[in-house]
Image (cartoon, grey):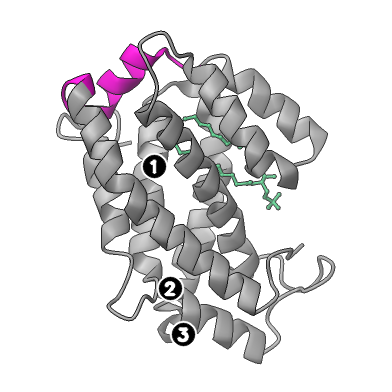
Amino acid sequence: SVAVEDPKFTLQEVLDTFKSCLSENKEVFLEHYVAGWLGLVRFMNSLGSVFSFIAKDAVNKIQILINHLNGENGAHYVTVQSMVKYELDNQLVDLTKRGSFPESGCRTLLRLHRALRWLELFLERLRTSTEESKTSLMCSEAYNESLSQHHAWIIRKAAGTAFWALPGRATFFDVMNVGTPEQVVTMLGDALPLISEVYQVTEDLYAQNNILDLP
Ligand code: 1PZ
């Protein structure tokens, strides 16, 4: 509720949060990962209510991770690496079909992780776009190349409908509150490698542990 009215809100801050996600030895701090996502949700809410069903699912998942962080086993959830090890070592993850652990940190973070890939592809398109480019098209192309592969058709249909309600490129840039279009492009160029690294570190970790397809 603080989100929409906060005059200082800029997408720059949000993307900066992802910078603080990685430790020196490339571990991902869950607290900062979650903070980055909260910022993204805030941004998404400022785009209009059409996106609230998407934001709502993201918020649910963020909340599950926060609960793990603040829970009695919170010490095991400091980094994504320690979370994966802790949950797998203690059989706290449904590996092949949904069952006893619908809120495991591993499966919950995986959903956000897949969405981060969509974000990366979308922002890269936005960065290299021209004034005539359609945000709805960039958004759906990025979605079709990533997240959609993990969604049932009914979700794909709903997402596709929401994309057409996206504001145009100029408004989108304004809402980011970063400055001129040139400054937005520069900011995106700085932020994207950071998001991309966080994504890749997580992807490698999940691949090594064979948990990229958690139900
Ligand atoms: C700025 C425009 C926003 C476009 C967002 C593009 C992503 C569309 C995703 C549509 C998801 C709709 C609702 C819920 C889906 C869930 O079924 C899945 C799987 O979770 P499960 O059912 O297995 O528990 N949830 C997700 O895939 C997580 C989706 C998070 C979307 C976050 C978008 C990030 C937006 C950043 C804004 C700049």
Tell me if 159 is positioned left or right of 153 in this view: left
Q: Residue 89 is drawn in which quadrant?
A: bottom right
Q: Secondary structure at mark 2?
A: helix
Image point (43%, 73%), residue name = 69
Other-residue count near label 1 (Cα within 10 Å), few / some / many at <14 / 14–19 / ≥20 = some
For the residue marked with disc 2, what is the amino acid?
A: Leu
Q: Residues within 10 Å of mark 3 (few under 14, many from 20)?
A: some
Quadrant the C terminus occupies: bottom right
**Alpha carbon separation for disc pair 1 and 2:** 19 Å
List x then y, in percent, for residue 93: 70, 76
Give the residue type at disc 3: His
Identify the residue shown where x is 57% and y is 34%: 142
Front of the two marks 1 and 2: 1
For disc 1, the marked residue is 40
Work out whether residue 63 or residue 96 is closer to the camera in this orientation and state it: 96
In the drawing, what numbered circle is on residue 76?
Answer: 3
- Quadrant the N terminus occupies: top left
Asked whether residue 55 appears in the rendered view, the answer is yes
Q: Disc 1 beta carbon < 8 A from ligand 1? A: yes
Label 2, label 3: how far apart the Cα atoms are? 8 Å
Q: Which residue is mark 2?
A: 69
Q: Does the magenta run of residues contain 167?
A: yes
